[in-house]
Amino acid sequence: MTTTSPAPDLARRAEHGSPDKLRTAIGSAVGTTIENYDFLAYGTAAALYFNTVFFHAEDPVVGVLLGFATFGIGFAMRPLGGVIGGYLGDKIGRKPVLVGALLLMGISTVLIGVLPTYQQVGLLAPILLTLIRVIQGIAFGAEWGGAILMTFEHAPWKKRGRYTAIPQAGVPLGLLLANLVFLWSSTLDSELAWRLPFLLSSVLIVAGLIIRYKVSESPEFTDTKTAGLVVKNPIKEVFKRDWRTILRVISLRLAESGGFYVIVTYMLSYLTTGDQPIAERSTALSGLIIAAAIGLVTTILFGRLTDRIGRRPVYIAGSVLLMAFAFPMFLLVNTGLPYLIVFVYIVAMSIIHDSLAGTQGAWFSELFSTNTRSSGASIGYQFSAAISGFIPLIATAVAVPLGWQGVAWVYLGCGLLGFIGALLTRETWGPAERAAADRVIAGE
């Protein structure tokens, strides 16, 4: 009987996931690594080089502000990418979005590496750079939803936190690769110091495309399409049905992404620029590299923890730690001691940031129905990115009248938003949900 056949199949999938679950997770992780390498390479270059390469400003602070402004423009375009990618992911499938976003991101990143400078073509240089940032932002906005949802929908139900944390680990891995390359290229006494990291992404693009082409489509999307449950306009439907949830996701995400860019982008500039820099570039980059390497493990460990105790408790704890660390981290780095600077990066990245990032993949996916999941999760995630992308610019501007204390308040504010969002968002993997999954696996 056809009425009884789905139950064993559902129980088997709930317990074991699809046969492609690990390959999908790794393929998604490779893609998110490349995406984050490409995007974060720009943030590093903006902090270290672009104030003079593309923006002819006599005041170094103005040059940094302009560099961070174009950094923020890329983020401003991410909601558009999230809308496009989310819509297509719910209409035609998750896989095409994955491949297309990666290809678009890779091409635009390589183009940055061959752009003429301000000294060569004048105002045309920052104009071209800004246009490429727009394309990057759209591509990156479409990327996350497809990668996370493919992994989530292939994974065993009781291990979805662990599996979705694997592509989330692409954030520290992309950061690690980008900063390793910049640490190496900074020894070059030529334009290659900033061009080479962008050009090298072409190697990663080819590898990523090969892996992603081999990943099968999401089984849950396939089931939804077969059952005729694909909605005509997923964007309209998700705003009509889940607009409150989208706002909660934005609040939750601001803690992770806003805090991340204070540490990764603003802090790098804060430590290494000015008349009397607090630290050498190598010290700051080494702190980032060490924290990112540790993050490859901690992100997945936090994802596993959410499978055991739920998504909400981990996020609340991470948000509280973020708020508590806002002022101490500046007091520690202001000593100029290299080991304390490295310690700050480890705490802020490997513990605070990764506890939030490791939770998001499963939690955000579980908040939406399958036929609008790509749209809802992507829109919430990327709209928050549009705000947090301007955090380095805001932090730099606030630091002018208020000093580092103003930036600490910005960081603390990000944590407060995440804390409030976590309190207002329902738990999706509490005792009741875990018990329900056990019953499905048992075939009850």
Image (cartoon, helix red, strand yellow):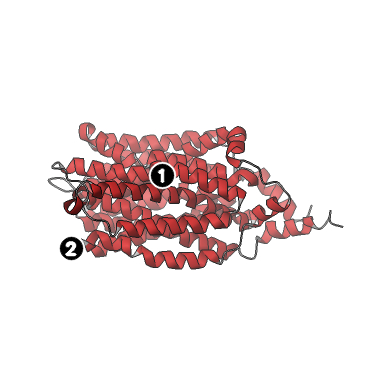
293 to the left or right of 155? left
In this orientation, which residue lies closer to the viewer: 100 or 264? 100
Residue at 26% over, 34% down: 398
* Image depth: mark 1 or mark 2 in front: 2
Which comes sooner in the sequence, label 1 or label 2?
A: 2
Residue 190: give its label. 2
Q: Tell me what residue is drawn at x 26 percent, y 60 percent.
A: 195
**Whether residue 430 can be seen here:** no
Query: Badge 1 is on which residue?
Result: 257
- Looking at numbered disc 2 in the image, what kind of residue is underneath it? Ser
Q: Secondary structure at mark 1?
A: helix
Quarter of the image with the N terminus is: bottom right
- From the viewer's perspective, is 429 left or right of 119? right
Question: Disc 1 residue type?
Answer: Ser
Q: Position of residue 277 (x, y in %)?
A: 16, 48
Report whether 164 appears left or right of 42. Answer: right
Q: Residue 322: horizontal and vertical position, in percent? A: 39, 41
